[in-house]
């Protein structure tokens, strides 16, 4: 088997990645930790805050997402696009709570020119003026829209692959895999970092997980940010009855991602609320170096703030108290399960 030594590669095969994923767990974590330490400060964990700036009513039919208009049995309050001044004030509060990155998600299929996109541009400028990283997830977009976001100072654009090309059609049919790749290429052309990852626990195989990582690794450069999510089943969605994944599956996925994408920031994202403190620390040892901090990710639960305090205390860092607790619209960088 080809050794994963931390060299940046764009020619990973699905077989190679699947073989890494299936290594004995301690061997896999050991290799991943060595690569992680070679490319990153092992004691640095970036905190990101996630905010739903426009909630619900999305015309896409993603099977995992409670914001889809197709899933009529989901109990979700739809909200219009938020006022930029309110968003910037929330970003400032999140910054005071310890967040370095502020991510804003709108439940749109695609960006449309007009007053709402103008408002998003103002949000990005306002967040950047605070000295924070700014990330948005807005769906598909055109080159001139990507150019405007770049000019506003956008740090990163989130647009997840979700899963492998082979399994994708089982999860989404209203947008093709090629659409997603085209959006990512458009963003990259204007110098904006990519935030792109996926979700495990939707019924995919290990080979599907490896195939998604192979697609990411083929990008040149690799995505700067790679969110790894575990499905959070939501009542009323087609995937509501999926069983929870074993926490060690998430550890394996994080470790494999670190080996395949050595220099990327690996973000422990949705599904973290189901992990104990020890499993989360194991993910950090295995190569995760960012997490979403706060009790909600868009519309799905995140780790309790008290639990996060215990987590950071255990790894030797004392986080700020978060004054945003209980505000569903207050945390993030991506449609955490979307």
Image (tube, rainbow, N blue to C red):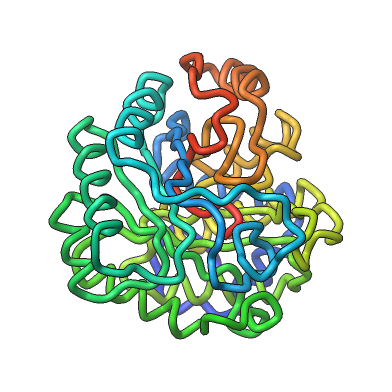
Q: Is residue 247 above or below residue 180?
A: above
Q: Is residue 311 above or below residue 162?
A: above
In screen coordinates, is 192 left or right of 318?
Answer: left
In screen coordinates, is 99 left or right of 220?
Answer: right
Task: Residue 242: name its quadrant.
Answer: bottom right
Quarter holding the N terminus? bottom right
List the single residue furthest toward the left. Answer: 151
Judge whether residue 35 can be spotted in this image.
Answer: no
How many numbered discs, if any?
0
- For the point 32% across and 72% down, the residue is 141
In screen coordinates, is 253 left or right of 333?
Answer: right
Q: Is residue 275 above or below residue 322?
A: below
x and y percentages locating residue 133 in the rendered image: 29, 41
Task: Residue 92: name its quadrant.
Answer: top left
Q: Nearer the viewer, residue 47 or 219?
A: 47
x and y percentages locating residue 288 in the rendered image: 54, 44
- For the point 22% across and 75% down, the residue is 143
Quarter holding the C terminus? bottom right
- For the point 42% across and 47% down, the residue is 53
In screen coordinates, is 65 left or right of 26?
Answer: left
x and y percentages locating residue 334 in the rendered image: 48, 52
x and y percentages locating residue 111 in the rendered image: 34, 68
- For the point 46% across and 85% down, the residue is 178
Judge whether residue 94 can be spotted in this image.
Answer: yes
Q: Nearer the viewer, residue 73 or 335?
A: 73
């Amino acid at each position: 088997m080809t050794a994963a030594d931390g060299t940046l590669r764009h020619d990973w095969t699905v077989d190679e990645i699947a073989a890494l994923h299936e290594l004995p767990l301690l061997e896999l974590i050991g290799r991943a930790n060595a690569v992680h330490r070679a490319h990153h400060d092992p004691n640095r964990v970036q905190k990101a805050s996630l905010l739903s700036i426009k909630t619900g009513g999305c015309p896409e039919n993603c099977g995992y997402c409670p914001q889809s208009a197709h899933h009529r049995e989901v109990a979700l309050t739809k909200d219009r696009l938020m006022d930029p001044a309110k968003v910037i004030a929330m970003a400032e509060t999140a910054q005071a709570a310890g967040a370095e990155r502020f991510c804003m998600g709108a439940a749109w299929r695609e960006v449309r020119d007009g007053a709402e996109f103008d408002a998003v541009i103002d949000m990005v400028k306002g967040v950047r003026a605070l000295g924070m990283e700014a990330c948005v997830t807005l769906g598909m977009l055109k080159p001139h829209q990507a150019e405007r976001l770049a000019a506003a100072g956008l740090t990163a654009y989130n647009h997840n692959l979700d899963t492998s090309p082979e399994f994708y059609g089982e999860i989404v049919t209203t947008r093709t895999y090629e659409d997603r790749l085209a959006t990512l290429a458009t963003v990259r052309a204007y110098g904006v970092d990519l935030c792109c990852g996926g979700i495990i626990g939707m019924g995919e195989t290990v080979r599907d997980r490896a195939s998604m990582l192979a697609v990411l690794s083929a990008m040149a450069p690799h995505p700067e940010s790679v969110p790894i999510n575990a499905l959070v089943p939501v009542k009323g969605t087609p995937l509501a009855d999926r069983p929870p994944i074993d926490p060690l599956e998430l550890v394996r996925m994080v470790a494999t991602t670190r080996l395949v994408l050595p220099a990327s920031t690996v973000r422990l994202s949705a599904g973290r609320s189901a992990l104990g403190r020890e499993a989360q620390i194991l993910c950090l040892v295995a190569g995760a170096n960012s997490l979403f901090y706060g009790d909600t990710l868009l519309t799905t639960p995140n780790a309790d703030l008290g639990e996060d305090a215990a987590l950071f205390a255990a790894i030797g860092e004392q986080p700020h108290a978060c004054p945003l607790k209980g505000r569903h619209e207050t945390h993030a960088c991506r449609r955490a399960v979307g």
